[in-house]
Amino acid sequence: MAFLEVKNLTKSFGDVEVLKGIDVAIEKGEVLSVIGSSGNGKTTFLRCLNNLETPNGGEIIVDGETVFPSHVKEGEFSEKLTFGLVFQGFNLFPQYTALQNLTLALNARAEIRLKKQKVGFFDRKKQLKLIKKENEEYALDLLNSVGLSDKVNYYPCQLSGGQCQRVAIARAMALKPKILCFDEPTSALDPELTGEVLKVIKELKENSKITMVIVTHEMEFAKSISDKVLFMADGKVCEFGTPEEVFDNPKNELTKQFLKNYNE
Ligand SMILES: Nc1ncnc2c1ncn2[C@@H]1O[C@H](COP(=O)(O)OP(=O)(O)OP(=O)(O)O)[C@@H](O)[C@H]1O
Ligand SMILES: [Mg+2]
């Protein structure tokens, strides 16, 4: 069984069928790029994976565990994060520094865990202080790994778009998801800032070997970083294969047309 298996995933908004039965499978540590024209359901696919939309049908299985349909009951707390998502527009909390953007969820998770363990108020405060210190050190390491050690106390409004996106990547990594998803991570950036973000994503692949799903319009990037490429058209998988298969020897007419438009 593959590490990520998506089977016959469907999603409609009202009468509009956006995902019409997506089937895809990738192995652990692989990078999957999802390409396709605007409005074809790429973001909807990522949002379904990340439980931000509820699919109408199908299955999502990660590491042998069915995450959709979910077996987790409403209000149940799971320490494990299956998917992490880096948004196109960063979605950082503007009122928090780069460092706080990372530690916020880590500290909240520790607090919930201690409450669940019914640790008394004063012990909890003591333990939390230690955990917060550890979380801060861990977050500093992560910010360092995306080249932002000198910006940890900056607020998002004091950072460039590329730096914000690097904070967002570090934040998504902080919760140690099994699979990290990106929705057009560079499309909100000025062209000169695109390179620094793509470099960070490439380094993540090399250093952390985390499994990734990347929706992108950067074809050269997709070609160089991906193990598998999925071309979506009309809410379906139009073509799926290695970058060589999809980019150099596409079989489907729609893929050929899409790539031709890109290369013109
Ligand atoms: N919450 C929603 N309610 C209604 N329709 C939606 C909703 N979200 C997405 N859609 C519709 O679903 C279709 C696919 O949208 P989606 O954002 O997934 O496309 P996309 O492939 O990511 O496009 P782009 O490349 O422009 O980002 C569009 O027609 C869009 O209008
Ligand atoms: Mg989109």
Image (cartoon, helix red, strand yellow):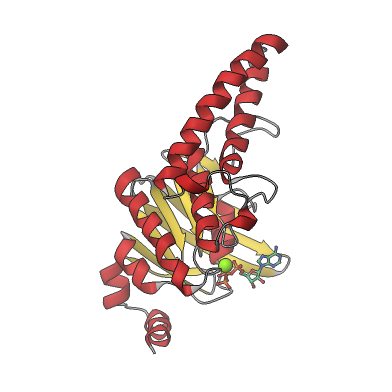
Image quarter (top left, top right, bottom left or bottom right) of the N terminus: top left
**What residue appears at the point 49 percent right and 54 percent down from the top-left corner?**
166
Quick check: which quadrant has ligand 2? bottom right
Residue 170 is situated, as x and y percent measured from the top left of the image, at 48, 46
The image quadrant of residue 45 is bottom right
Name the residue nearer the viewer: 43 or 102: 102
The image quadrant of residue 228 is bottom left
On screen, residue 212 versus residue 107, left or right, reads: left
**What residue appears at the point 52 percent right and 50 percent down from the top-left corner?**
167
How many marks on residues? 0
**What residue appears at the point 58 percent right and 44 percent down from the top-left corner?**
153
Residue 120 is situated, as x and y percent measured from the top left of the image, at 70, 9
On screen, residue 122 versus residue 88, left or right, reads: right
Residue 258 is situated, as x and y percent measured from the top left of the image, at 43, 82
In the rendered view, tell whether residue 132 sits above or below residue 189: above
Image quarter (top left, top right, bottom left or bottom right) of the C terminus: bottom left
